[in-house]
Amino acid sequence: MISKEELVRCLKNANFSDEQINRILNKRIKTLLYRGKAKEIEDILKVLEAHEINKETIANCLTVFAYGKAKEIENILKVLEEYKIKKETIENCLSVLARGKAKEIENILKVLEEHKINKETIENCLS
C-alpha cells in the first residue's frame, strides 16, 4: 500500500507539476493506493523518464503504477524499441506496459512479422 502523501512525494521527485499531481489525486486512485508501492512507483517513473515518456501521458494512465513492475516495463520498452514501435504509439497505450509481459509481446511481434503484418497495423492496435 502507498499513502497519498507518499504518492505525492514520488510524483514531486519525478518533477510532475502541481496541476498534474492534483489531476492524478482527483482521479479514482483507490486501486493505486491499495496496490501501489512507493519504491516500485519511483522505479517505474525512472524507467519511463529514461525512455522519455511524456509526464502528461503518465498522469493519464495510473494503471501503470498500480499493476506495472519497473523491470518488466523496461523489458517491454526494449522489445517495442527493437521492433521499432514509435514512442507516440507506446504513449497512446501505456496499459500495455502495466499488464503486458515482454516475452509474450516479443513472441506476438515475431508471429506478426513472420506473417508480414504491416507495422502501421500493429501500431494502430498495440493493445
Image (cartoon, rainbow, N blue to C red):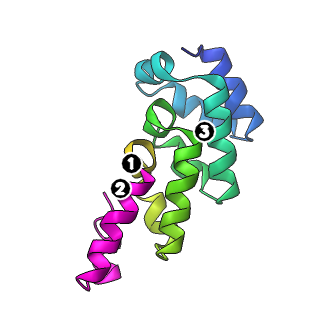
- Residue at horizontal 73%, vertical 33%? 12
Relative placement, left or right, of 116 versus 4 is left
Q: What is the x, y in percent for residue 6?
A: 67, 19
Q: Which residue is mark 2?
A: 104
Instruction: Please tell me whether mark 3 or mark 2 is closer to you in this view.
Output: 2
- State yes or no: residue 121 in magenta: yes
Instruction: Please tell me whether mark 3 or mark 1 is closer to you in this view.
Output: 1
Q: Earlier in the sequence, mark 3 or mark 1?
A: 3
Range covered by the magenta-colored residues = 100-127
Q: Give the SS element for disc 3.
A: helix
Q: Which residue is mark 1?
A: 100
Disc 3 marks a residue whose amino acid type is Gln
- Residue at horizontal 40%, vertical 24%? 28
Q: Crowdedness of circle 2 by 10 Å Cα count: few (<14), some, many (20+)?
A: few
- Is 18 placed above or below 72 here? above
Rounded to the nearest angstrom, the CA distance separating label 3 from label 2 is 32 Å
- Is 88 placed above or below 38 here? below
Q: Crowdedness of circle 3 by 10 Å Cα count: few (<14), some, many (20+)?
A: some
Instruction: Please tell me whether mark 2 or mark 1 is closer to you in this view.
Output: 2
- Is 1 placed above or below 107 here? above
Q: Quadrant of the C terminus?
A: bottom left
Rounded to the nearest angstrom, the CA distance separating label 2 from label 1 is 8 Å
Q: Which residue is mark 3?
A: 20
Q: Give the SS element for disc 1.
A: loop
Q: Quadrant of the N terminus?
A: top right
Q: CB atoms at circles 3 and 1 under 8 Å apart?
A: no
Relative placement, left or right, of 124 versus 69 is left
